[in-house]
Amino acid sequence: MTTPLRFNFGGAKPRRNLPYMSSSKRGEANFVGAFERAYLAQNKGLHIGGREFEVPGFGIADLVWINLRYDTCTIENILTKLPNQRLRAFEMKLRDWRQALQQAYRYSYFADQSIVVIPLDVAQQAKAFLKLFRDLRIGLWAFDMSSNSISRIHTPRGMRARNTAARTLAFDLISRKVNLCKLEK
């Protein structure tokens, strides 16, 4: 099994814009971290990704991941195969699934799949609006931190990013951050 390459994109820190009492709460950050570990445990293979990924004009995704489908690093693989991989963006909220949906929709302009991840109890409320998620082509997943289980309620299939230029920019930002040749076995 190959260890995923995980990194922090080091973009804007939106928590710094909040008052101290709000910015010191770690509930959502703990939720994101627990989900990330559970997601990687379920998805074997070579991955790159990280938290707080910003594409200017399209927001800051809580988490992005690319499942790489090649084993050797060559200039050809980096330049031609990386953009053919599926970029998945996740937006996570502990309570406000509507806000998460709004943010995830923005990410769908650069990501091939954009998915809202919320706790199980909140997901029960959001499931009543599943048609909205389907119409917008946004995924809805529930995550239970106590059991580390992910419930994939709806995952859009056969998607590509809504904006080709934004997708190209996202892959360019990722390739600048990560030396993919270090992923070679």
Image (cartoon, rainbow, N blue to C red):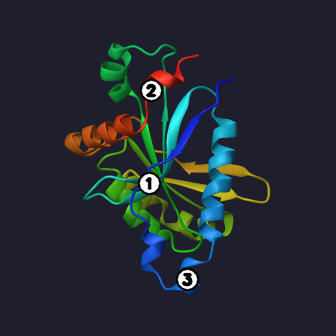
Q: Compared with residue 114, is residue 20 higher up or lower down, i.e. above or below?
A: below
At mark 3, the secondary structure is helix
Name which residue lies at 62% across and 67% down. 124
Name which residue type carries label 3: Ser
Residue at the farthest right position: 147
At mark 2, the secondary structure is helix
Alpha carbons under labels 2 and 3: distance apart: 37 Å
**Numbered mark located on residue 180 in the image:** 2
Name which residue lies at 60% across and 64% down. 29
Name which residue type carries label 1: Gly
Residue 49 coordinates in the image, percent (x, y)? 50, 41
Alpha carbons under labels 1 and 3: distance apart: 21 Å
Residue 155 coordinates in the image, percent (x, y)? 50, 45
Q: Which residue is mark 1?
A: 10
Q: Compared with residue 27, is residue 2 higher up or lower down, i.e. above or below?
A: above
Q: Is residue 115 left or right of residue 12?
A: right
Q: Which residue is mark 3?
A: 22
Between 54 and 160, the one nearer to me in the picture: 54
Residue 162 coordinates in the image, percent (x, y)? 26, 46
Which mark is first along the chain, 3 or 2? 3
- The part of the image, by quadrant, that contains residue 1 is top right
Task: Tell me if I can see residue 159 in this picture.
Answer: no
At mark 1, the secondary structure is loop
